[in-house]
Amino acid sequence: MAKKSEEEEFVEKIKEHSGFLSRFRGKGVLWHSIATFGVIGWMIAMPTVLGAYLGRYLDSRLTGPEGISWTITFIMIGLAIGIYSVWRFFFYRGH
């Protein structure tokens, strides 16, 4: 039996990998949905957490015993920024 040439082996490997990719792409809808939910989570969580840290810092520096709570204020601002980011990600497609 003749030994396969390098070119034939290369073509077989390409076919093998393309079969794997086509099977993976067939399952892509699920992974795309999971990735989208992950992005939404980060888009809401990051501004909210950063707002909480900034508010906590300002509370420790500026607020007296009866002052405004900067933590709650910046958590709400961060949440609003996160919700706006998600809205813009899904519904605003202007360039």
Image (cartoon, helix red, strand yellow):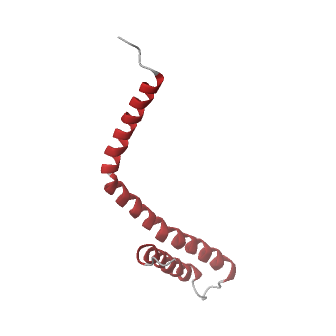
Residue 15 pos. (x, y %):
37, 35
Work out which quarter of the rendered image holds the N terminus and state it: top left
Q: Nearer the viewer, residue 88 or 93?
A: 93
Up the image or down, 79 lies above or below 29; here it is: below
Residue drawn 34% across the image and 49% down it: 25
Picture coordinates of residue 83, whole percent (x, y): 45, 77
Q: How many marks?
A: 0
Among all residues in the image, which is located at the extreme right? Answer: 61
Q: Is residue 93 left or right of residue 60?
A: left
Q: Residue at x 57, y 75 (%)?
A: 51
Q: Relative to 49, does residue 70 appear above or below in the rendering? A: below
In x, y percent, where is residue 32?
Answer: 37, 58
Q: Residue at x 41, y 73 (%)?
A: 90
| 37 is higher (above) or lower (below) than 84 | above
Compare residues 9 and 49 and report the one nearer the observer. 9
Residue 18: x and y in percent read 38, 40
Please indicate whether residue 70 sits to the left or right of residue 11 in the image.
right
- State the residue in front, 56 or 27: 27
- The answer to whether 10 is drawn above or below residue 21 in the figure is above
